[in-house]
Image (cartoon, coloured by chain):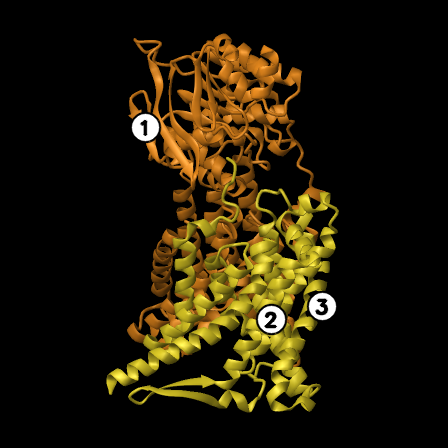
Chain colours: A orange, B yellow
């Protein structure tokens, strides 16, 4: 379990117990069979929303095609009853397994896409399945009655039993969601949602976590679909694979509150009865009224409170008292770094590295090395290829040729998170934070990325915050930090994974003189602790004070290497920075 | 004999691919303006197409506003007239809803506002589809013209193999090409066109150049909507349609735009043409119910195998 989530988890569990008991008490007083059906449908759609929320709410991978899994569950239950006479209980279980497998089959190609392409592609799956089912002749199938064994075939004369089962399934789904939320799973998903590249660079295997969330999500959706089919007794491709089904998961969750366990429940409790009642009252005159209600609800919520009711209400009336208390852990001393017998031996050796974009050689035959405990400054005018060099080194881009070895191990050809786990921490030119998460969680992401256990991760994160001097801000949301604090937080996130080498991309950019001095002090202290640093920087005066050695890049090539003094007096360097004319005038 | 049938089928697939493909091309240009150039993810583009079909239907068959033009000219004039109508609708949509999740408001945010756009346009799509069901009913309708049942015969080309050119599709094809050319010339060579492209491509820079970005956006979005609506009106002469027809085409449009390369009007046209071609050829092998499924597979292949089209401004600075 993650730090600080214990009390919240207990509160949520209590609330869940109270809400479900109250809901069931309420159903006792409802006698109209149509309203009883609505009361059964609310938890079903809420469960579907919960499943969508795990992938798209926490993980931010917007899916417009969750009907795939819902429909697979529904058709599995229906077809197994019809053809094999299988109990729907087992059918739901089987549907759950198939939903998980479908998630793997769908996720494997589709997670190569991001953002809106992911959302659109997910839409294509249920529609394709829909056409195939129509082609195969499964237009409309009803579940036959098996009078012999009513319990095994979920044939209850008391309709409230269905509501009870639906609530139990929903409680199961919410528990899964709570476990996700309060573990490193949830933190990884939140980090991916807020900034995928930063999560990857912090050592999080983003693809694997996304896939896990899709599998969990697909299984829950299939359960919802399977039970839905059993309650309604008839399935058609449109009623379980159709667009309105996918939309329903999106709408109830966004309306209620995205990335909150309670969101789908609130959304379903308000929208499902509303839409169903309108459909029943006005459906004959206004046949599509249900869809219109969902459309209006989703547009309204997006424009008025984009995170959904839960968050808006909470922010307005239940201001977070104080941020979660920082765990009272003494910062441990930095892990004893194996002082290598051959201090001064190169930690990083880059040879002949090249990377082109079309015809533009962004990095061309670059070679240099960094000794253990050294601070190497990489300087060069805009467009010299500095950031591209870092991107190739930590696996964001693939190289065209060349090699880079960290203590003899090849770095290139690995994924970004793997490079991070080899011991390479990275910060970005434009700070990539997780703005909604508190500073401590931001840093813990880095520690999880390095594969630390929960306890060690917290300790390591606290230590990193002390190292950069941000211990007092650890409970503040990252979005509220100043630019300097953000830079330091990003540095702490990189440090929390106990790296051997830090790649810092313009850590001083946009800082004032004094702020700059503050960050420089932190860096100097890191060097005293034996950290090896490779830093990109524009501001010469800062670099002159900090770096042991310079590598000068221009047009992707190494122009000069050497001690700072020597490099700044090199005429070719001056020429690259200030131009030939300036040099000529100086000399004249 | 078999060879003759094969040749006849292939030749007809080619001609149908070209005619239908060009109409798809026009349809894709509409989305190309909105998605390819303005970078607004519009999930409701299929519903704009549907509105174009119904606008044409009510002008020609239902409301008989244009019935004085007769069954030959009426449907095609109706299709063109659907353009300005949906242009106005699109501009209003942009003014009240889309502008709140796009343009200058979201320029520079991490995902360029795509999340909000997906959600809002999903809502618009739900309202238009289901509202369409309330207004238009769910029984499929068609813009009736005797031309859709007539064909020019070319050949016999080889043995008894003959090429059938459906007259409705052929005229729709010429109208589509004409509209595409007029639009292309307008965007490329007029002041208005340049302002639109500049505003859509980089709103911030365009503001500095003194372009009224909000207005330009509204016009560009309206144009995208209107162009797709014209394509819808043209298609209405040879297919029957209901309020939920948009879904079948929204995927086709995105396939075309992505395939053609983002940000290019001509590219969107070629992309749409290619997709139309693929669809017509899939009809040679696949049963008709599976043709749409085939389009989805093509869409997935395009977005998966053409990574350069995938990430938009892919030169993201890390």
State the image coordinates of residue B311 (x, y, percent, origin top left): 49, 48
The residue drawn where x is 65% and y is 47% is: B106
The residue drawn where x is 56% and y is 73% is: B176
Is residue A23 visible in the rendered image? The answer is no
Distance CA(mark 2)–CA(mark 1): 54 Å
On screen, residue B64 above or below A168 = below
Q: Nearer the viewer, residue A258 or B198?
A: B198
Secondary structure beneath dot 3 equals helix
On screen, residue B251 above or below A201 = below
Sort mark 2 into few (<14), some (14-19) or many (20+) by Cα contacts within 10 Å: some
The C terminus of chain A is located in which quarter?
top right
Quarter residue B194 falls in:
bottom right
Q: Which residue is mark 3?
A: B88
State the image coordinates of residue B32 (x, y, percent, origin top left): 56, 60
- Whether discs 2 and 1 lie on one chain: the answer is no
State the image coordinates of residue B286 (x, y, percent, origin top left): 34, 75
Determine whether label 1 and label 3 are within 8 Å by CB.
no
Foreground label between 2 and 3 = 2
Quarter residue A561 falls in:
top left
Which labelled disc corresponds to residue A403? 1
Determine whether label 2 and label 1 are within 8 Å by CB.
no
Secondary structure beneath dot 1 equals strand
Residue extending farthest to the front is: A588
Q: Nearer the viewer, residue A580 or B33?
A: A580
Quarter residue A519 falls in:
top right
- Chain of residue at mark 3: B
- Chain of residue at mark 1: A
Foreground label between 2 and 1 = 2
Q: Which residue is mark 2?
A: B179
On screen, residue A342 above or below A358 = above
Secondary structure beneath dot 2 equals helix
Which labelled disc corresponds to residue A440? none
């Amino acid at each position: 379990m993650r730090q600080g989530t214990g009390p919240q988890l207990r509160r949520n569990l209590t609330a869940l117990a109270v809400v479900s008991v109250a809901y069931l008490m309420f159903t006792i007083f409802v006698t109209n069979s149509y309203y009883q059906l609505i009361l059964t449908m609310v938890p079903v759609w809420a469960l579907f929303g919960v499943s969508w929320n795990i992938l798209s709410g926490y993980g931010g991978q917007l899916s417009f095609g969750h009907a795939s899994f819902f429909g697979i569950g529904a058709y599995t239950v229906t077809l197994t009853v019809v053809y094999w006479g299988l109990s729907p209980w087992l059918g739901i279980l089987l549907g759950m397994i198939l939903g998980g497998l479908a998630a793997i089959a769908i996720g494997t190609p589709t997670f190569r896409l991001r953002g809106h392409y992911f959302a659109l592609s997910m839409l294509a799956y249920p529609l394709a399945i829909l056409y195939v089912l129509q082609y195969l002749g499964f237009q409309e199938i009803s579940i036959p009655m098996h009078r012999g064994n009513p319990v095994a075939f979920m044939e209850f004369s008391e309709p409230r039993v269905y509501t009870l089962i639906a609530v139990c399934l929903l409680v199961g789904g919410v528990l899964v969601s709570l476990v996700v939320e309060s573990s490193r799973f949830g933190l990884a998903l939140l980090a991916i949602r807020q900034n995928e590249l930063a999560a990857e660079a912090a050592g999080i295997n983003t693809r694997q976590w996304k896939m896990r969330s899709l599998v969990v999500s697909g299984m829950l959706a299939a359960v919802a679909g399977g039970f839905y089919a059993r309650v309604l007794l008839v399935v058609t491709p449109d009623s379980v694979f159709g667009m309105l089904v996918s939309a329903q998961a999106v709408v109830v969750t966004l309306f209620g509150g995205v990335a909150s366990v309670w969101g789908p429940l609130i959304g379903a409790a308000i929208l499902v009865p509303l839409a169903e009642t309108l459909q029943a009252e006005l459906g004959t005159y206004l046949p599509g009224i249900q869809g219109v209600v969902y459309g209006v609800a989703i547009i309204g919520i997006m424009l008025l409170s984009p995170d959904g009711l839960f968050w808006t209400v909470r922010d307005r009336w239940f201001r977070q008292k104080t941020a979660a208390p920082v765990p009272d852990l003494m910062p441990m001393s930095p892990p004893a770094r194996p002082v290598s017998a051959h201090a001064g031996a190169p930690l990083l050796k880059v040879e002949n590295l090249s990377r082109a974009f079309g015809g533009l050689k962004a990095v061309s035959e670059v070679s240099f090395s960094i000794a253990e405990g050294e601070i190497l400054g990489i300087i060069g005018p805009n467009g010299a290829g500095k950031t591209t060099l870092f991107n190739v080194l930590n696996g964001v881009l693939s190289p065209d040729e060349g090699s880079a070895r960290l203590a003899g191990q090849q770095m290139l050809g690995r994924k970004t998170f793997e490079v991070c786990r080899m011991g390479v921490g990275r910060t970005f030119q434009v700070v990539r934070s997780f703005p909604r998460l508190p500073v401590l969680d931001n840093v813990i992401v880095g520690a999880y990325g390095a594969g630390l256990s929960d306890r060690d991760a917290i300790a390591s994160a606290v230590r990193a915050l002390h190292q950069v001097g941000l211990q007092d801000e650890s409970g503040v949301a990252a979005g509220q930090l100043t630019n300097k604090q953000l830079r330091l937080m990003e540095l702490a996130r990189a440090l929390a994974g106990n790296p051997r080498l830090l790649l810092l991309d313009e850590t001083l950019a946009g800082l004032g003189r004094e702020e700059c001095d503050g960050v420089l002090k932190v860096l100097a202290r890191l060097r005293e602790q034996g950290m090896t640093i490779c830093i990109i920087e524009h501001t010469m005066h800062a670099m002159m004070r900090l770096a042991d050695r310079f590598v000068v890049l221009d047009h992707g090539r190494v122009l000069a290497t050497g001690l700072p003094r020597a490099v700044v007096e090199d005429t070719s360097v001056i020429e690259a920075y200030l131009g030939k004319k300036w040099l000529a005038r100086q000399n004249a | 004999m078999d060879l003759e049938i094969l040749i006849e089928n292939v030749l007809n697939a080619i001609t149908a691919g070209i005619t239908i493909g060009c109409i798809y091309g026009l349809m894709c240009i509409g989305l190309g303006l909105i998605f390819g150039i303005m970078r607004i993810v519009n999930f409701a583009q299929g519903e704009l197409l549907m509105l174009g079909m119904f606008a044409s239907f009510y002008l020609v068959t239902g409301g008989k506003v244009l019935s004085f033009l007769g069954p030959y000219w009426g449907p095609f004039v109706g299709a063109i007239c659907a353009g300005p109508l949906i242009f106005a609708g699109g501009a209003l949509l942009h003014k009240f809803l889309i502008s709140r999740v796009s343009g200058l408001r979201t320029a520079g945010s991490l995902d360029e506002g795509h999340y909000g756009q997906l959600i809002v346009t999903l809502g618009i799509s739900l309202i238009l589809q289901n509202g369409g069901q309330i207004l238009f009913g769910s029984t499929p309708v068609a813009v009736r013209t005797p031309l859709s049942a007539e064909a020019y015969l070319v050949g016999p080309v080889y043995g008894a193999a003959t090429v059938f050119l459906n007259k409705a599709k052929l005229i729709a094809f010429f109208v589509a090409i004409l509209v595409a050319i007029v639009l292309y010339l307008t965007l490329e060579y007029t002041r208005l066109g340049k302002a639109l492209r500049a505003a859509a491509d980089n709103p911030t820079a365009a503001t500095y150049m003194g372009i009224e970005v909000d207005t330009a956006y509204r016009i560009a979005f309206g144009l995208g909507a209107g162009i797709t609506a014209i394509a819808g009106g043209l298609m209405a002469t040879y297919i029957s349609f209901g309020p939920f027809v948009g879904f079948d085409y929204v995927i086709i449009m995105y396939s075309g735009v992505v395939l053609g390369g983002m940000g290019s009007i001509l590219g969107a046209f070629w992309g749409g043409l290619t997709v139309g071609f693929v669809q017509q050829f899939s009809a040679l092998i696949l049963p008709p119910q599976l043709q749409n499924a085939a389009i989805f597979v093509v869409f997935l292949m395009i977005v998966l195998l053409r990574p350069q089209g995938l990430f938009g401004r892919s030169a993201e600075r890390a």
